[in-house]
Amino acid sequence: MRRPPPLLVVYSFVAIAFASAALAFFVLPGQLVNNVRFKDASTNVATEEKRLKARHDVRTVGVQLVGALALIVGAALTWRSVWLTREGQISDRLATAMLQLGGSDATQRVAAIHALGRAARDSSNDHAAAMALLGEHLRAVASAVDEDGKPRELDSRRGVDPEVQAVAMVLRARRSRWDPKEPRLNFTSIDFRNAPLQGVDLRRANLRQSNFRGAFLSDANLSGTWLDSATLKSANLQRSNLKRATLTGADLSFAHAEGAYLCAADLDEVIWAHTEFYGANLRKAKGLHESVRNPKFIASDTQTKWPRAKK
């Protein structure tokens, strides 16, 4: 629901309505009804009736116009009332979800995550706050780093943490156009192993040191993201958009990046091992040395587009 017009605009319409009413009753009849046409009105009853009828018609049209304006003002006030009620309900939902998110019951925490996701989809004002809460929560319950900031030794696993899966569903369904330019969406140092993130829009997000091992990121929009020191081992990055992404020191070993778009991405110090780049676009990518264009590091085909060799 779009934000209603501010009260100043509504009050302006009210003032215009009152002014229009005054004009319709007192000014317009005299201005629009030419008394020259009714010069015999003082002595001729029929002419006087025509003059009065003409003035009445002018007032009728004016009243209709004022009535239409009053309907617009009433609709605006009703819209504002509904919007304020709805915003209050969203705020209550956010407060309840925050309490549940800090509880000990994992089922309630998953429900709270979905509640935050609904609030973020319903309100552009609360979208950024809800995303920040989810990021902080996952860093507390599913951190990918130790207390000293070093990456944890996390092996692959068959399933995915229920709370991480819930956040993944929220991220896929959210309205990314409501993301503020600054600060960036912050999901750093989070264990996203095997998370279902197909088609997610995380453009420009801060994902440093997060673990996406085995995660499903096919068709994802990761353009401009910060993935420094992130783990993307065995991740599915097929057809994902990584334009201008920063992957300095990231682990891309055994990743499936067929058809991925990495134009102008920063690939300095990336860990390569049997990374599949069939049909990928690596034009203008930085830090991609000739030595890694070897099947044991990067698997490619004739459709793979490489950076132009420096002269």
Image: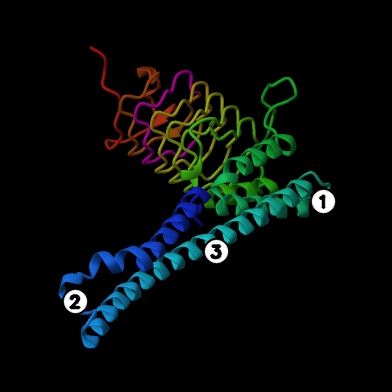
Q: In percent of the image, x 36 and y 24: which residue is there?
A: 285
Image spot of residue 13 (x, y percent): 44, 56
**Magenta stretch contains residue 80:** no
- Principal SS element in the magenta part? loop
Q: In the image, is 216 to the left or to the right of 117?
A: left
Q: Amino acid at mark 2?
A: Phe
Q: Are marks 2 and 3 in contact (CB under 8 Å)?
A: no
Quarter of the image for the C terminus: give it.
top left
The first of marks 1 and 3 along the sequence is 3
Residue at the disc numbered 2:
38
Q: Amino acid at mark 1?
A: Asp
Q: Amino acid at mark 3?
A: Thr
Tell me which segment is drawn in magenta.
Answer: 255-270
Q: Secondary structure at mark 3?
A: helix
Image spot of residue 234 (x, y percent): 53, 38
130 vs 69, nearest the viewer? 69
Image spot of residue 165 (x, y percent): 64, 49
Please tell me whether residue 208 is drawn above or below residue 180 in the rendered image: above
296 vs 245, nearest the viewer? 245
Residue at the disc numbered 1:
105
Q: CA distance from mark 1 to mark 2?
A: 86 Å
Q: Secondary structure at mark 2?
A: helix
Crowding at mark 3 (Cα within 10 Å: few <14, some 14-19, many 20+): few
Residue at the disc numbered 3:
78
Q: Secondary structure at mark 1?
A: loop
Query: Disc count in the image?
Result: 3
Of badges 2 and 3, nearer the viewer stands 2
Residue 193: tell me if it is visible: no
Of badges 1 and 2, nearer the viewer stands 2
Farthest front residue in view: 43
Residue 225: tell me if it is visible: yes
